[in-house]
Amino acid sequence: MSRIVARHVGKLYGNADDTASTRALADFSLAVDDNEILCVVGPSGCGKSTFLNLVAGFIQPSEGELTVNGKPVLGPGPDRGVVFQEDALFPWLTAIENVAFGLELRKIDRTVARERARDALKLVGLDGFEQHLPKALSGGMKQRVAISRVLVNDPDVMLLDEPFSALDTFTRTTLQGELLRIWQHHKRTFVFVTHNVEEAVLLGDRVAVMAKTPEGGTLVQEIAIDIPRPRDTTGAEFNDYKRQILTALHMEVKL
Amino acid sequence: MGAGERNRRRGEISRLLGLAKSLIVPLLVAVVWEIVARNHLLSSSLFPSLTGVANVGLDWIFGTNHSALVYSGTWLEHAGSSAQRVLAGFAIGSLAGLTLGVLTGWSKFWRGLLDPMVQWLRPIPVTAWVPLSIIWFGIGARPAIGLVVIGAFFPAYVNTVHGVMNVEDKLIRAARMLGADRRQMLFRVVLPAALPTIATGMRIGLGFSWMCVIVSEMLAVKSGIGYVLWDSYYFANLDMVVAAMASVGFLGFLSDKIFRLLLRSRLRWTDQGDRA
């Protein structure tokens, strides 16, 4: 079953008859299956974040149709959790208050919410840091809190917008492993946007390669990554996929 | 001696050094002041001596030697009167500024309706309101409170509008994603995020409040530090004038300190909270 379906989706900023308008996404069609990790990779300006923001409901498509669970997306909601690129935790709330925030909005009993938040923090390896304010946490720890504040709401879809791009290589590798472990234990649909080809091959069941064209960002190729997990990032198979994606990207760049 | 112990000791030493440093300039000013006054480098009718001010000030507070004449032992009474007016006016003015500021910052409808009027009234100096406040409220505590309300209102209003309108977009998006409705957005995201800016506006307003209370007590009230200040000026009691000035400075400083202490736990997440 497809969780997310995009049919000929276009996104235009500004009025169509205005020369200053820009087309971020053009004729974009893609289906994301249930419990699949789809990685979206491409250079900046290719529309990958636009696609994510459309699924999240922060913006609405100008053309075409976008459905999640068979229903058109009308606005943001906790069924589609977003992990942002930059730290978007509420700086005045402690780690556990940040995680419990979504539950408390829905009037879930405070003690129950705190208990579930505590478990969600434990899941990302942050037990003992419940009372820390974001400013007392490292970049990697903040993104762990961000993941757990989304997971605690048990979303159908998790949308990750270059969540590890600001982290150093070692922290990033650790968090990639954690994310896979979480996905294996709490299967759901992940859409993971990145500009890092290796990250896309490592995490994705499928990789959607996007490119920037004069008509707007568009889908170039969908590649199923057929390597069993755990994946060896230095193996020949892995490199074949990397080459395939890089080629797809380069061809577009040369145009 | 462990590293923690050493660090703590180093922290104490640097704090003491900081305190000593902060006293250098006041001590120098005091010494120069006293030398100038004692040696009559400036006429004593123009320039009161520090010891003279201290003498009168102590009598004003404790009623020791009647050097403050009719005001001997009345400091607490007058300081209390001024402080009450500041407290009442500041509470009303800040609350009004906060409420209208949130409406204006949060809703386009209210912004279009209210903001032009407020921006038009804002440049009028608070002192220009004195005649109207006397005509409306008569002589007594009420015109003083009225003036303080005006003084406290504008900084609270301006900073609240600014704080509410400039909440980082990523926090708004995060809250929408977690399912916040408009009301929850306002009370759980926008107001906490704007609190540091709002608090800064209120602190400025608190300073204005003391200015307003002194001005109105000079002109329209028969009690309070401002009244004592003006009355002493009429009788050319310069020692008392300076003692009253020092009192306002102290009360203003104290109220600011208390205000910051009250908000410290809520601003723990900002750098402001660290320094309070």
Image (tube, coloured by chain):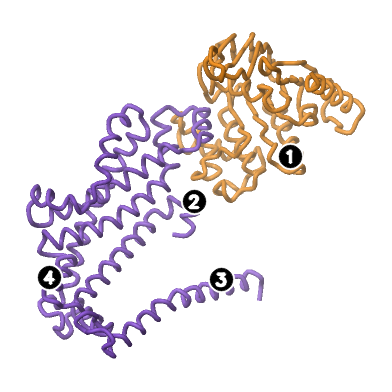
Return the disc, 2 or 4, that comes first in the chain's sequence. Answer: 4
Give the orange chain's letter. Answer: A
In the rendered image, which quarter is residue A68 located in? top right
Q: Among all residues in the image, which is located at the extreme bottom?
A: B39
Label ID, residue B270 = 2
Q: Residue at x 80, y 31 (%)?
A: A198
Question: Gap between marks 4 and 1, in whole Å?
Answer: 72 Å
Q: Please name the residue shown 89% across and 33% down the image.
A: A234
Front label number (4 vs 1): 4
Q: Amino acid at mark 4?
A: Asp
Measuring from the top left, give residue B89's x and y in whole percent.
22, 52
Say what secondary structure mark 2 lies in: loop
Query: Is residue A16 shown to the viewer in this render?
Result: yes
Rounded to the nearest whole Å, what is the CA distance between mark 3 and mark 4? 48 Å
> Residue beneath label 4, please?
B231
Left or right: residue A49 compared with residue B64: right
Q: Is residue B272 left or right of residue B129?
A: right
The residue lying toward the viewer, choosing from A113 and A48, is A48
| Mark toward the viewer: 3 or 4 | 4
Q: Is residue B121 above or below residue B202?
A: above
> Closer to the N terminus: mark 3 or mark 4?
3
Is circle 2 on the same chain as circle 3?
Answer: yes
The chain carrying label 3 is: B
Chain letter for purple, please: B
Question: What is the quadrant of the N terminus of chain A in the image?
Answer: top right
Measured Cα–Cα span from mark 1 to mark 3 = 37 Å
Relative to residue B94, is residue A13 depicted above or below? above
Q: Residue at x 69, y 17 (%)?
A: A214
Mark 3 lies on residue = B11
